[in-house]
Amino acid sequence: MQRLISLYRDRSGEMPERCDLLPLSGSARKYYRLSGSGGTVIGCIGTNPAENRAFLALDAQFRANGLHAPEVYGVSADGMAYLQEDLGGGQLFELLKPAVPDGSFSPEQLDWLHDTLSLLPAVQFKVGAGFDWSVCFPDREFNARMVDFDLNYFKYDFLKLTGLEFNEIRLQDDFDRLRADALDFEGDTFMYRDFQARNVMIKDGEPCFIDFQGGRRGPVEYDLASFVWNAGTHFSAPLRRELEADYLRALDAFRPVDTEAFYRRYRLITLVRLLQETGAYGFRGLVERKQLFLDCIPTVLGCFRELTAEPFPRYPYLTELLQRLATEWDGRTILPGMEVAL
């Protein structure tokens, strides 16, 4: 905290009157709102200097390309703390939250969603253009190692904890094919990695972007899948199609769009993303017992049910396993005292 207080004093010449810890989510990073006669800012205390360097470099790239990310006001000498612009309290997820249970989004809420998806291609192509990928954390691109991490996240931090019986060799055969297919992408496009409504702020009616420190070079379909299939917002299939259409119209300004080919690839990338997301719900929810993540498990099982209604011919065992998980698992786990209300 002293580093943040010193940065505030250096910037404004005043001491902050309040330093309020903001709600924590899945990250170990801590965010504070510092306020006083020197103004209101957000202070971040990171846990990894490489992750902080990645955020600062990406933030500069966002802003250099006219994309609204928080302005950085100062960085501590050790690089572990920094002050940034306070974008207010308009987190898109919180603004949508009252309408999420029944999908009754207002015209204003829908405008925010359409605007956000229409901006996504600009983020992917403008941030990626000429960027030094070596600064990315934890790796420079969406590669075989990263895909393996995501698939194993699902297997070890969720699937095995359910106690559901499965053939690990057959599952790995499908994982190997899925990994190879997921890596078939070209171009220097930025993959936000965790593009979701919790990482978008609405300020003066416009989307602003935060928490992109895990971004890297990767396929454009990943961020679209991250946003529209996210279990926390649980968009209906018709709304998902509207948002996908917004994205494709905007994407056409950056590269020609073959809609059929795009959707074919987008579908398999959606599968990869949902497996990664479910691993996170397993670790943060089942292991760490954070209710926010436990609440998402029934919805992500519904996503698997919907996605595998049309089987994946190249991943037959994975398709069968996900269908079983979505229909047979009763919420019991191998962890003492832990059961999911499905």
Image (cartoon, helix red, strand yellow):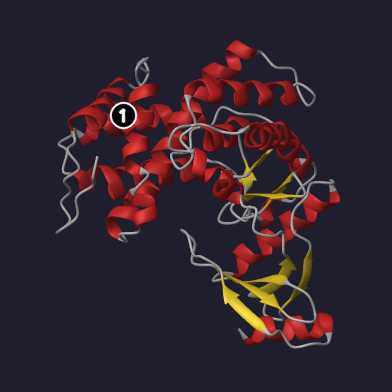
For image coordinates 30% across by 34% down, the residue present is 172
- Viewer-side residue, 89 vs 329: 89
Residue 26: % across, % down:
46, 58
Q: Quadrant of residue 321?
A: top left
User: Left or right: where does residue 130 sit relative to residue 135?
Assistant: right
User: Left or right: where does residue 245 sit relative to residue 327?
Assistant: right
Image quarter where the N terminus lies is bottom right
Total marks in image: 1
For image coordinates 44% across by 34% down, the residue present is 272
Image quarter where the C terminus lies is top left
Residue 250: % across, % down:
74, 26
User: Left or right: where does residue 162 sit relative to residue 234?
Assistant: left
Residue 307: % across, % down:
40, 23
For image coordinates 16% across by 45% down, the residue present is 332
The amino acid beneath tag 1 is Asp
For image coordinates 30% across by 43% down, the residue present is 155
- Viewer-side residue, 224 vs 99: 99
Q: Which residue does the numbered mark 1 point to in the structure image?
A: 173
Q: Relative to 311, is 88 above or below?
A: below
Q: Secondary structure at mark 1?
A: helix
Q: Relative to 273, is 184 above or below?
A: above
Q: Residues within 10 Å of mark 1 (few under 14, many from 20)?
A: some
Residue 189: % across, % down:
69, 37
